[in-house]
Amino acid sequence: MQTETNKRALGLSFEFFPPHNAEANLRLWRSVERLAPLGPDFVSVTYGAGGTTRERTNAAMLTIRDRARLNIAGHLTCVGATRQETLDVARGYAKLGATRIVALRGDKPKGADRFEPHPDGFQSAAELVSALHDIGDFKISVAAYPEKHPEAASEQADIDNLKRKIDAGASEAITQFFFENDTFLRFRDKCVAAGIDVPILPGILPVENFGKMVKFAARCATSVPDWMHQAFGNAQNTQESTILATAIAVEMCDELRDEGVGHFHFYTLNNPDLTYDICQGLGVPIKALSTQAGGLVA
């Protein structure tokens, strides 16, 4: 049974994506305003390939920093940019007050068979991590895949690649989302056996729309178990689906806490309500958001 002390000690982080129009900007701020009182350790803002969302990412980070006074992390990829351009973005994040970067290789371009690095760019996430480690005092998060990355030759090759990123200077890994705790726990055991000793934060995707999630999971090579298909198929309406999604995520996280997990990273998709309800189900304490100061008060 979790004590109140253990509940208060739970670490949280939330991922947002930069808005593309005024309406989406309001949606982002509503998400931040809704989730900030949960006291996350940090929030991250995604970054388009080749810097396609650079200005919007920076603007979103500024909004979160100034209006909610949260610790911000910028995403950074190796796609479509030179080494200098990529590191300039990292230096820009530092000027915004970001002390953490989520360093990623990045997805292959649409229609391409494989990732093709820029001729003058970083060849891998490990190279990017090493360079970031050399230019600043960043806390660097990297991606991990409990179910083998679609482009990896094998599970072991995938773990070997994660080990290279850690050895290059990464301080933690954030996983792709998953729906079976055994999948994460087996992966964590394999990482320990490989000598990976940094925190591995489970990535949690609240299921707002089951059909859309299934399509997204297929692109990520994430398994959706049969029991989830059956359970959501039996839901009669949106309200029942929401209750089911909340219950599934709370049960997953509670079981993982019993296995020693102390931090969860939520992929919010800029839809905060499910994430908020899940955190409430986990007993996360609420802080008041000071609208005058734009920050949190105890």
Image (spheres, helix red, strand yellow):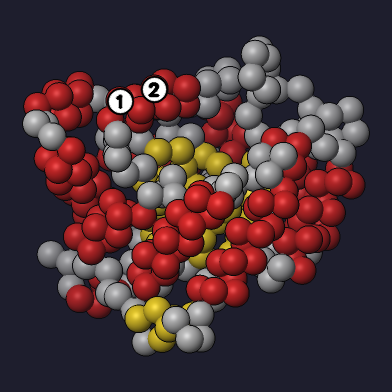
Local SS, label 1: helix
Tag shown at residue 211 = 1
Quarter of the figure that contains the N terminus? bottom left
Q: Residue 180 location in percent, x, y?
A: 27, 35
Q: Are marks 1 and 2 in contact (CB under 8 Å)?
A: yes
Q: Is residue 214 visible?
A: yes
Q: Quadrant of residue 210?
A: top left
Residue 201 sits above or below residue 52 on the image? below
Q: Decide if residue 294 is on the left or right side of residue 77.
A: left
Residue 127 sits above or below residue 271 on the image? above
Q: Quadrant of residue 97?
A: bottom right
Q: Residue 279 location in percent, x, y?
A: 28, 60
Quarter of the figure that contains the C terminus? bottom left
Task: Identify which residue is drawn at 42% across, 27% down.
Answer: 216
Task: Identify which residue is drawn at 75% across, 37% down.
Answer: 50
Tag shown at residue 82 = none
Q: Decide if residue 16 is on the left or right side of residue 88.
A: left
Q: Decide if residue 269 is on the left or right side of residue 48.
A: left
Pick out the residue farthest to the front: 22
Question: Looking at the picture, which amino acid does disc 1 mark?
Answer: Gly
Label tally: 2
Q: Decide if residue 187 is on the left or right side of residue 274.
A: right
Question: Looking at the picture, which amino acid does disc 2 mark?
Answer: Lys
Q: Residue 248 location in percent, x, y?
A: 19, 43
* Disc 1/disc 2 C-alpha distance (Å): 7 Å
Local SS, label 2: helix
Q: Within 10 Å of the Cα at label 1, are there few (<14), some (14-19), or many (20+) other Cα atoms?
A: few
Q: Is residue 260 visible?
A: no
Task: Identify which residue is drawn at 17% across, 67% down.
Answer: 2
Q: Residue 250 location in percent, x, y?
A: 21, 51
The residue tagged 2 is 215
